[in-house]
Image: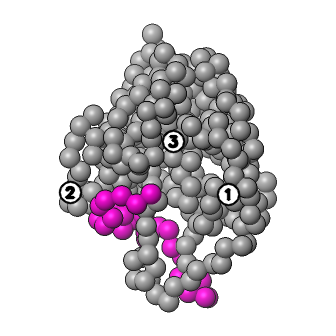
Amino acid sequence: MTGDRPGDAELQGWIDRTRAHPGTARQVKVCGCDIAYRIWDAPDPMAPRRDVVLLHGRNASLHWWAPIVPAMASSGRVVALDSSGAGSSGWRDRYSIGLYVHEVLEVVADAGLSDPVLMAHSFGGHIAFQSVLAQSRMFSGLVILDTRLARLTGEIEAQIPIDARPRRHYPDRETILSRFRFLPEQPPSTGPYRDHLAEEAIIHTPKGWTWKFHGLGVDMIDMEGLRAPLPLAQVIAGMTGPLGFIHGLDSVIIRDADLEQAAALSPRMQVLGIAGAGHHIMVDQPSALSQALNGLLLAGTNSAAE
């Protein structure tokens, strides 16, 4: 897929639609931690649909997805959640892939979704893989965005206590907003979408302004379960919904080996590149990404109906 980076006016339009359609805020307690999520209902509940669950990356939030949700909700109900330690969800003393998976499964059940397609960006892709392995019959499809598949066979990083990192506070709102950064960094680093994400990432406390997210490094998350290659090919073979791997053509994360590994998971796996997009595809190319996701959902719905 090709396309120039959108201008500020176009990006502002996406943000305005987000504010006009914020979805319904909900919360469910999972293993003692409050997990926040939002749900957008389909305009026609009687039409054929594909429900969708959206997972964000590390130190991100559901708001990374929110601007493209209004363009996707016509396909069915859409749920985006904040993992523990991120967004409006609570914090934990320890984090693990297993806990993240449990959060996903509980949110799907609490929202009453029907055979949803699981879509995930970056680190969220690993949570999605494990969620599918844990409850393959709960999900009808799997779409991954810019996730390093090579990490599945990598070594587990040594863990350090979460509290070893000092909590940064800032004296005013303007200062903390100016400190917001993409990881990895990518141009452009300014604009309406970036400003929207920065505003949703901060909170005021008696000590000053600070970040909502817990500031987790991968070394602070129990990655057990990612050491060995995963039998994903056998698990997703029974899925009737869309299967996709979408990457930014300018991404500094994805390598050829990741694309080959994705394609090898299933003959139905669609590997799509988004031109003009780095790792943070929804920030760089929201229109192209929403078109790609809607195309996958439509193809999956038609396939299931045949």
- What residue lies at 42% left-to-right and 25% top-to-bottom? 270
Is tag 1's residue or tag 3's residue first in the polypeptide sequence? 3
Q: Position of residue 105 (x, y in %)?
A: 68, 41
Between the C-alphas of marks 1 and 2, the distance is 37 Å
Q: Where the N terminus falls, by quadrant? A: top left
Between the C-alphas of marks 1 and 3, the distance is 17 Å
Is tag 3's residue or tag 2's residue first in the polypeptide sequence? 2
Say above or below: 39 vs 176: above
Q: Amino acid at mark 1?
A: Asp
Q: Amino acid at mark 2?
A: Gly
**For mark 3, what is the residue?**
147
Which residues lie in the magenta part? 184-209
Say above or below: 247 vs 22: above
Q: Quadrant of residue 224?
A: top right
Q: 107 or 227, which lies in front?
A: 227
Crowdedness near tag 2: few (<14), some (14–19) or many (≥20) residues, C-alpha within 10 Å: few
Residue 7, label in figure: 2
Q: Position of residue 69 (x, y in %)?
A: 41, 46
User: Is 191 part of what is drawn in magenta?
Assistant: yes
Q: 153 or 119, which lies in front?
A: 153
Q: Amino acid at mark 3?
A: Thr
Q: 190 or 42, which lies in front?
A: 190
Please tell me whether mark 3 or mark 2 is closer to you in this view: 3
**For mark 1, what is the residue?**
219
Q: Position of residue 146 (x, y in %)?
A: 46, 42
- What residue lies at 44% left-to-right and 57% top-to-bottom? 184
Crowdedness near tag 3: few (<14), some (14–19) or many (≥20) residues, C-alpha within 10 Å: many
Label 3: element kind? loop
Q: How many numbered marks are there?
A: 3
Q: Is residue 260 left or right of residue 238?
A: left
Say above or below: 128 vs 92: above
